[in-house]
Image (cartoon, rainbow, N blue to C red):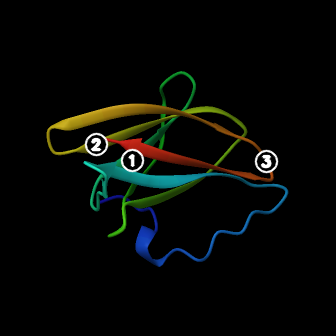
Amino acid sequence: MCGAPDQATLPALEISPNEAVIHGTVVKDGAPLPGAYVRLLGEAGEFTAEVQTSATGYFRFYAADGAWTLRTLAPGQSVDTGASAHKGEATEVTVEL
């Protein structure tokens, strides 16, 4: 279990000019996938954070500006998805497993 907040109880998405957000949904066969793990990896592949998707497959990270990799893990599966973060913006990503 990671120390990240429960994704099901996150407050509504609000973006300040000093924050960059990467958020989205993990889906499998067109349906949201709860309980998947999403890791936020830096440009050199270094681990930064990890969250578990909510019952609706939702995840959210607050990140620094730049290029990131979302490594999504579910039983027997792993997929990497690129994402960019920019201050004052929310980048929405759908991860297909």
- Front-most of residues 54 and 65: 54
Alpha-carbon distance for marks 2 and 3? 27 Å
Q: Residue furthest right?
A: 17
Residue at 62 percent across and 75 percent down: it is 12
Residue at 57 percent across and 25 percent down: it is 43
Q: Is residue 6 visible?
A: no
**Disc 3 designates what residue?**
87
Alpha-carbon distance for marks 1 and 3? 21 Å
Residue at 50 percent across and 54 percent down: it is 24
Q: Quadrant of the N terminus?
A: bottom left
Q: Residue 62, how many percent across, how many down?
A: 62, 54
* Residue 62 shown left or right of residue 25 in the figure: right
**Disc 2 designates what residue?**
73
Q: Is residue 40 above or below residue 27?
A: above
Disc 2 marks a residue whose amino acid type is Leu
Q: Residue 70, how many percent across, how many down?
A: 46, 38
Is label 1 in contact with label 2 (beta carbons under 8 Å)?
yes
Q: Earlier in the sequence, mark 2 or mark 3?
A: 2
Q: Residue furthest left?
A: 76
**Disc 1 designates what residue?**
38
